Image (tube, rainbow, N blue to C red):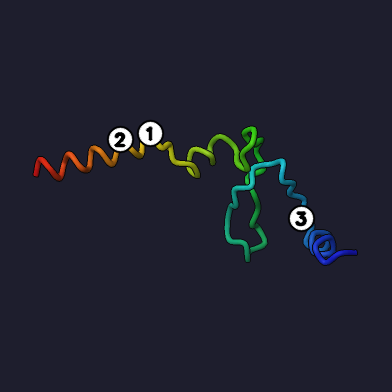
Amino acid sequence: MSIIKNYLKQNKVTHTFSDCQWPIGDPQEKDFHFCEAETLTGKPYCKEHCDVAYIDERELKKEKEAQKNRRIAA
């Protein structure tokens, strides 16, 4: 048996990567787990965690422009 399969079996790891991969808790603790909600197509996370993990570039551009305008006005 491979080292990974042995680890998964010994630690009763049941997470599949078709579920949300957002980690919850401390990996060194027994209650550590992954979100396991349904993922968005092509993403490793569910909708809620994609909202946290990914930055909307248009919003980022707007924020940078607003900061620049605040510096000019000051």
In-image side of 35 versus 60 (left or right) = right
Which residue reaches farthest right?
A: 1
Q: What's the residue at 64%, 47% (across, down)?
A: 21
Would you identify the image quadrant in which residue 74 lies?
A: top left
In-image side of 58 versus 3 (left or right) = left
- For badge 3, the amino acid type reads Val
Q: Which residue is mark 2?
A: 62
Give the x, y percent position of residue 23. 60, 52
Q: Which residue is mark 3?
A: 13
In-image side of 14 versus 35 (left or right) = right
Q: Earlier in the sequence, mark 1 or mark 3?
A: 3
Identify the disc placed on residue 2: none
Residue 8 against residue 41 in the figure, above or below:
below
Callout 1: few (<14), some (14-19), or many (20+) C-alpha neighbours within 10 Å?
Answer: few
Residue 57 against residue 10 in the figure, above or below:
above
Question: Mark 3 or mark 2, which is nearer to you?
Answer: 2
Q: CA distance from mark 3 to mark 2?
A: 43 Å
**Of residues 70 and 47, the one drawn nearer to the viewer in this rendering:** 70
**Of residues 31 and 40, the one drawn nearer to the viewer in this rendering:** 40
Which residue reaches farthest left?
A: 74
Residue 40 against residue 11 in the figure, above or below:
above
Marks 2 and 1 close (CB-CB < 8 Å): yes
Give the x, y percent position of residue 42. 64, 36
Would you identify the image quadrant in which residue 69 lies?
A: top left
Callout 2: few (<14), some (14-19), or many (20+) C-alpha neighbours within 10 Å?
Answer: few
Identify the disc placed on residue 58: 1
Q: CA distance from mark 2 to mark 1?
A: 6 Å
Q: What's the residue at 10%, 40% (across, down)?
A: 73
Q: What's the residue at 76%, 55% (across, down)?
A: 13
